Image (tube, rainbow, N blue to C red):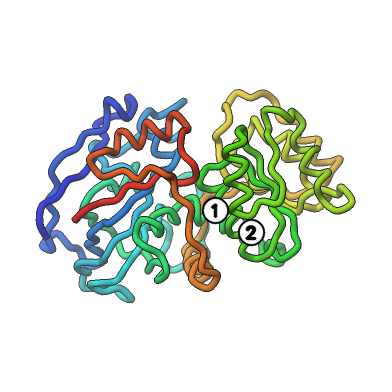
């Protein structure tokens, strides 16, 4: 394989200071028995990448020195180690953030320890031309998507899938009501998946322009949370009999949970999938759940089995992930981080990687 480039994090003083672009040269001689050598064709960013780069509040923990950042990626297998099964040269693959999970259990769910030990933090990630990774860190990607589209599924896609379909017997189905928050990657993926099964989606946003885009994607109702302070109650009023939504996909944590509790129906589900809100947003009145009994469920990524189910779903339903209007090149990664930091993006920020 020819030499390429990779980004490394030399520290956690912020992306502008710590991100460095250096030469990368990985050869098949470096392959271990369980390793896969991948020519990366695309990557996408998550809020996690921004937080890791500046270790915001110590939430993410330390990095491996000079680690390659990024967890989301898609590419083509170049070579495999002697013990690799089910993958071979030419296969199109997408990355799995938590390859340290026991490979013997496809249903194992990652916790904080596996996330902190995952790609882009302790293990080299996807912001590079080439990637040497254990076979447990990739799966075959959807046949109907381009690499740039497929690169959006690793975190936000899988998290949204787990939120909607991760509780056996309580999977979202046709006619259900789902509330999603904002226009980030998880929220847009959840909207697309819910619409694909015939569910009704209520979305929140802060601008009329984004509201129109949400409606184009299938949102039945859109609430401007800057104009409507009690948007949880407003969402509830849209549901039949004003009973409340069947599921809330909550991306902001402390700063939105009060409204999520107001929106959910009795015995509904609130999936906590993100921490976009302020960590010091105050005490959350969890006694509110007593007056509207519901399930409050933490979701961190998903299992390998869920990931494979997601790939099949995307193929069967012909789902095409939504990407931001601006597509970056590998040389422009700092600009991609900046766009995320300034929250100018819609859904997923993607990086197209040239061979």
- Mark sitting earlier along the chain (2/1): 1
Question: Camera-side residue: 151 or 201?
Answer: 201
Residue occupying image coordinates x 47% and y 64%: 304
Provide the secondary structure element on which disc 2 rests. helix
Residue occupying image coordinates x 21% and y 73%: 82
Left or right, 36 with reference to 254: left
Where is residue 224 shown, x and y percent of the image?
68, 34
Where is residue 79 shown, x and y percent of the image?
19, 68
How many residues crowd around disc 1 within 10 Å: few (fewer than 14), some, or many (20 or more)?
Answer: many
Where is residue 308 shown, x and y percent of the image?
47, 68
- Quarter of the image that includes the C terminus: bottom left
- Relative to 214, does residue 76 appear above or below in the rendering? below
Left or right, 82 with reference to 266: left
Residue 249 is tagged as none
Residue at the spot of label 1: 189
Distance, label 2 to label 1, CA atoms, is 8 Å
- Quarter of the image that includes the N terminus: bottom left
Left or right, 298 with reference to 347: right
Residue at the spot of label 2: 194
Where is residue 303 shown, x and y percent of the image?
50, 61
Q: Quadrant of residue 182?
A: top right
């Amino acid at each position: 394989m020819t030499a390429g480039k990779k980004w490394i994090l030399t520290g956690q003083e912020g992306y502008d200071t710590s991100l460095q672009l250096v030469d990368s040269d990985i050869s098949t001689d470096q392959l271990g028995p369980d390793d896969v050598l991948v020519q990366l064709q695309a990557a996408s960013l998550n809020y996690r990448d921004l937080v890791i780069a500046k270790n915001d509040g110590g939430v993410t923990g330390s990095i491996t020195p000079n680690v390659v950042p990024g967890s989301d990626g898609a590419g083509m297998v170049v070579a495999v180690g002697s013990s690799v099964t089910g993958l071979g040269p030419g296969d199109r693959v997408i990355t799995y953030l938590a390859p340290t999970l026991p490979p013997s259990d496809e249903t194992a769910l990652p916790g904080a320890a596996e996330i902190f030990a995952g790609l882009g933090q302790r293990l080299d990630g996807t912001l590079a031309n080439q990637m040497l990774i254990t076979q447990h860190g990739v799966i075959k990607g959807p046949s109907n998507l381009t690499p740039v589209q497929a690169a959006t599924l690793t975190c936000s896609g899988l998290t949204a899938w787990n939120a909607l379909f991760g509780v056996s017997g309580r999977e979202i189905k046709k006619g259900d009501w789902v509330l999603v928050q904002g226009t980030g990657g998880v929220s847009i993926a959840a909207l697309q998946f819910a619409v694909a099964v015939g569910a009704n989606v209520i979305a929140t946003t802060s601008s009329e322009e984004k509201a129109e885009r949400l409606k184009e994607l299938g949102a039945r109702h859109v609430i401007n949370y800057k104009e409507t302070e009690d948007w949880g109650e407003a969402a509830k009023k849209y549901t039949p009999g004003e009973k409340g939504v069947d599921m809330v996909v909550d991306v902001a944590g402390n700063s939105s949970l009060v409204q999520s509790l107001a929106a959910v129906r009795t015995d509904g589900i609130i999936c906590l999938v993100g921490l976009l809100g302020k960590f010091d947003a105050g005490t959350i009145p969890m006694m509110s759940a007593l007056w509207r009994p519901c399930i409050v469920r933490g979701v961190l990524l998903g299992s390998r089995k869920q990931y494979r189910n997601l790939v099949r779903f995307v193929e069967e339903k012909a789902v095409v992930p939504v990407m931001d209007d601006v597509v970056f090149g590998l040389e422009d990664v700092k600009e991609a981080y900046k766009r995320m930091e300034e929250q100018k993006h819609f859904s997923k920020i993607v990086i197209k990687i040239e061979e």
